[in-house]
Image: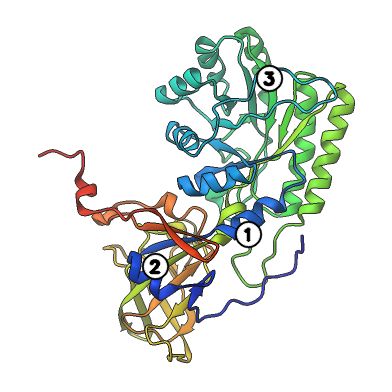
Amino acid sequence: MSTAAPPSRPVVRRDIAGVSISELAQDHGTPLYVYEAETIRRRCRDLAAWDTIRFAQKACSNLAILDLVRREGVMVDAVSTGEIHRALAAGYQPHAASGAASASELPPVHPIVYTADIFDRDSLDAVAKLGIHVNCGSADMLEQLAERVPGASVTLRVNPGFGHGHSQKTNTGGEGSKHGIWHADIPEVLRRAEWAGLSVTGLHMHIGSGTDLAHLAEVAGALERVALEIGRSLTTISAGGGLPVPYKPGEVHADLGGYFTLWDATRKKLEQQFGHRIRLEIEPGRYLTAESGYLITEVRAVKHQGSRKYVLVDAGFNTLARPVLYGSYHPMSICPRDPADAAATEEVAIGGPLCESGDIFTQTDGGFVATRSLPAAEVGDLLVIEIAGAYGFVMASNYNSKPLPAEVLIDGGKARLVRARQTPGDLIRGETV
């Protein structure tokens, strides 16, 4: 896959995958999430060299998206009971077919893996009832699982002692992270697993989201060292996720060919050491869906605050939280209400409707308001926030009692509603006076 920088994005956009943005807004209202199916398929196929692609569905868990990746042969990761039920509703089987593989064959793949640092009571009930494979991020999970599922096989998620990410909040390795079993504790954890009657068949490492290839490559060496401590019971290793997506001009995709080659070499060394085949998994989340997604929102006010010009839209951090959480950058474009309009660009700050000073889409890490060069916008124009298909809708909330937006999937030039917009009645369902 090419690592060339993406071309500069247009600041005026009138369609998404051939479907009119104005018509999408007219038909479904705003704010509105829109996804391109073909982009997701391309990203799935980018990773075809791996034995297993396992989608971290927390990035984008709409049932239509899960069904789409399932049809591409992608397995799924679940981090909650709700995500287990989503995977089942999208057509995934709860566990692999029975029967052990021979030494010359790859072991069966688990369609759903539950990955977490704890079992809440509902999740423990679900994995026990359904036979879901578990990726344990804490040693205490071992005895809890063994009590309910004697003789189960498990994967260990190991914190290698280092991490990296596009934000400290997305760093999932090192002492600053709660995730995974600390690498130095592995001998004791293996003893606990043996005492509990569990078989450790998988090993997983993930150091952060948006990491670069150099940091991703470090994980392979760390995993190999831990794998040798675990021994021949291992049949699956997971490189985790964290593949970067280019949000800003000049950013690039990872060298996927080089990354696979590195991990394939690690896998082959372990196969030679253990005398049987090892399944090699990768666990992308944002990589599969981020670039497919757009958030369409309507301009509702334009005003000056001193020397700074603000464009205020009907989406807020209740709709897309990444900028306020991480200072994340998203490309933006304008779809003018009048097709003939093509105004000169100007520097503007983009804000939302919430009763919060932090409700700004153009902010940097630390909450500092920034500006973006965009065509002059008027009330009724549409602002399109791009590369919004990962950690967008899934992190949306009802803050300020705002309803969750609708979601639309575009496939083959046709737009299909895949989640209805919440209603005022939905907001208070279940509440009593």
Would you place residue 411 above or below residue 188 in this image?
A: below
Circle 3: element type: strand
The crowding category of the residue bearing disc 3, from other C-alpha atoms within 10 Å (few below 14, some 14 to 19, many at least 20), is many
Judge whether residue 30 can be spotted in this image.
no
Q: Which residue is mark 3?
A: 200
Q: Give the number of the disc on residue 245.
A: 1
Colouring used for the render: rainbow
Disc on the earlier residue, 1 or 3? 3
Residue type highlighted by circle 2: Ile
Circle 2: element type: loop
Residue at (58%, 61%) from the top-left corner?
Answer: 291
Would you place residue 256 above or below residue 78 in this image?
A: below
Q: Quadrant of residue 9?
A: bottom right
Circle 1: element type: loop
The crowding category of the residue bearing disc 2, from other C-alpha atoms within 10 Å (few below 14, some 14 to 19, many at least 20), is many
For the residue pair 175 and 14, the one nearer the viewer reads as 14
